[in-house]
Image (tube, rainbow, N blue to C red):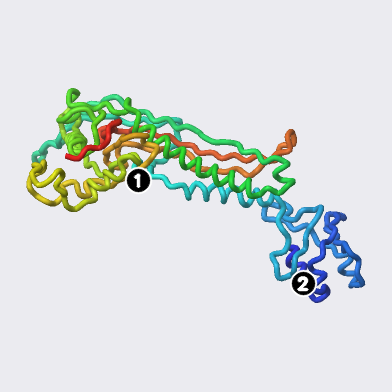
Amino acid sequence: MSLNDYLQQSAPLIDAAQRTQVFDVRAVDGRLVFNEATPRATSPQIRESMIPYPRDAQGYMTLNEHHAVLQESAGAGSTPNFPDLLRQGLMFDVFSGYNEMPVVYPQIVREVSSNKMSEEYLKDAGIGMLPVVAEGQPYPRAAIALNDGVKIDNLKRGLIIPITEEIRRFDQLGKVRDIANTLGRAARMTREQQVMNVLTTTGNYTRNSTTKDNDIGANYGSTTFGPAGLVTAYRTLVTMKDRKTGQYIGVLPNTLIVTPGLWFFARSLLSSIDLNRQGGPTTAEVYGAGIPNPFYQLATIVVSPLLGATYEWVLLEAKRAVYLQVVDPLSVTPPVYDESDDTYEYRVRDWYGVGMKDDRFAYFSNATAAPAAS
């Protein structure tokens, strides 16, 4: 029986003023004994009433055995003790912070499940075009020219958070909830940072026309963002092909990731339906004499400060270049008491791996120059 239910059933025997009294609570044979703090001429049932300890589904007491504050019967009953709030609230606060944190990586990566220490993917597999099979003739066997592979390691990340005796004794619940919420946001931001680290690592970009990967050139450089730079990146990606057979693989760039420094310029370039003549009526047009903007809605624009501090940008086909391998989703363990230092400790863990699966679908520029209109 909960304390609030007990009060509700005893309401006819207790007047309104007495329901707000503070009662002393003692433990007798595993039961709670309530004695009035200020003796009054009331029913003996109230002076010495015995109810069992209320417990939750896990068998934990939900009422402090040393003291209890009885509120009015119309209220919410007793205030839960601190360990109960830890068990019930920490997971909610961690996941609230995790889900509230704004991130962009779900738009970029392909998320897959993994049960290994690392996953290895085939970098290239030259097969070529499918041949014609004549009537009644056997199918020819493919001469698969395997190239080197790409390995993405899964790494375990996490923290143990201590809740000291001082925080519990002085009921600083607000601090505990803030820490848990911040920890959830940090876990989410860690995933975002790992994805951006993969996108901005120049060693992940290895394609070039000299190695027969495309018709234009390297898929990495210091290309200034603007119409000319965007055309270069676009042509580099759409002409990507298998280096063994020369077959185009059909890359379709659809996502542009920019830093805050490029956000407004990129919006103007890709979101404007019409073109404006720059420099007066005598300036020659670069892309013909038409008014419609050829870059209009070329790609979805994504902005992230984690991409860089100046004018870095990435053009890619979403969910083809970068893989996120999830071993275990974010988890929170219940608080465990450590007698050596009078603390409750709980652990937050996230286990996954992030890596460049196929850089033929991405073009990265680490430009430091301001964008240029052309």
Tell me: 14 left or right of 317: right
Tell me what residue is drawn at x 77 percent, y 68 percent: 7
Q: Does 45 sit left or right of 254 as displayed? A: right
Residue 261: x %, y % from top left: 33, 39
The quadrant where residue 119 appears: top left
Please name the residue that numbered disc 2 is placed on. Answer: 9
Residue in the picture at 10% in, 42% down? 283
Question: Up-down: is 374 above or below 177?
Answer: above
Type of residue at label 2? Gln
Q: Which residue is mark 1?
A: 107
Where's residue 61, x and y in %? 74, 53
Asked whether disc 1 touches disc 2, contact meaning CB atoms under 8 Å apart, the reply is no
The amino acid on which the numbered mark 1 sits, given as a three-letter code, is Gln
Front residue of this view, candidates 121 and 358: 358
Distance in Å between CA atoms under marks 1 and 2: 56 Å
Nearer-the-camera pick, 121 or 315: 315
Quick one: SS at disc 1? helix
x, y percent for residue 196: 38, 35
Q: Secondary structure at mark 2?
A: helix
- Dot 2, crowdedness within 10 Å: few (<14), some or many (≥20)? few
Drawn side of residue 32 relative to residue 292, left or right: right
**Residue at the (35%, 45%) spot, across then down:** 107
Quadrant where the C terminus sits is top left
Marks 1 and 2, the one that precedes in the sequence: 2
The answer to which quarter of the image holds residue 166 is top right
Nearer to us in this view, 74 or 276 = 276
Residue 176 rendering spot, x and y as whole percentages:
63, 46
Count how many numbered circles sit on residues in the image.
2
Which quadrant of the figure contains the N terminus? bottom right
